[in-house]
Amino acid sequence: MRIAFLDSGIGGITVLNEALKQLPDENYLFFADTLHVPYGTKSMEEVNACVKQSVDIIMNEQVKALVIACNTATSSAISELRSSYSIPIIGMEPAVKPAVEMNRTTGKRVLVLATELTLKQSKYTELVSRVDDQCIVDSMPLPELVEHCEALNFDRKNIQDFFTTKLAAFDLDSYGTIVLGCTHFPYYTDILKEMLPEHIQVVDGNAGTVNRLSQVLQSTDRMYSNSSSRIEYMCSNNDPEYIKKMKRAMEILHL
Ligand code: DGL
């Protein structure tokens, strides 16, 4: 039985990559909802319907756990999914809590970058009001970065120009941490770090999510050992070119 990962596109491959490090003996199915990418500019109801369609396909594939490797899909659909299916479903949320803790004594602020839909959902606003007791958290939607990523645009200069424009409104000296609250964004961690003042840390929720997956597999007796892991890629429009793109995206993370 495999562990399934779902995202709108190639973003969730950054989470799968973390799973390969922490759980190298599992088999994986990665599903991209290419018919509906991007999710972040849609309404919650639309994303909910797209996620449900994709999960229905995934559930026919003999999977033992499902990771919603997408912050946007998690905030829109996780509760309904959990009440509809019996296997463990692990979701994601921007790593706001650890980022606030990291800056408790630094006097610096936290900037969360995510999709528009993630940032306007009550799941996010409630998370911030619960953990941001010092009012240090700011956020900015970056839908264009999802587009760059889906186009496999990893041109250093081009992406740094993009970040320079987007971050111009922020006094970076007053920030201690940038949270990547969308699974498409960790492809750009190194490019972003290179251009930021050295004291700013860039964090994402990938390792935390895979820790959680690992705990759930253990506690439900679903951990499995193969001699090596196997990954199958699927997408909702069955496009062989997109399957190649997903494999290329995984390679890019290993460059
Ligand atoms: N990768 C997704 C996330 O973590 C969403 C990107 C999109 O489809 O807009 O939010």
Image (cartoon, helix red, strand yellow):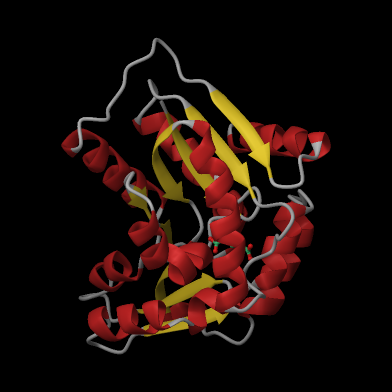
Quick check: can you spot residue 179? no
Q: Quadrant of the C terminus?
A: top right
- Identity of the residue furthest to the top in this view: 227
Rendering quadrant holding ligand 1 = bottom right
User: Which image quadrant is residue 124 in?
Assistant: bottom left
Which residue: 51% across, 74% down?
A: 118
Nearer to us in this view, 52 or 158: 52
Q: Is residue 152 above or below residue 252?
A: below
- Identity of the residue furthest to the left in this view: 219
Nearer to us in this view, 208 or 31: 31
Relative to 147, 103 lies left or right: left
Which residue: 28% across, 44% down?
A: 211
Whole-percent x and y of residue 96?
Answer: 34, 70
Which residue: 60% across, 49% down?
A: 187
Quick check: can you spot residue 228? yes
Whole-percent x and y of residue 166?
Answer: 66, 78
Q: Is residue 66 above or below residue 254?
A: below
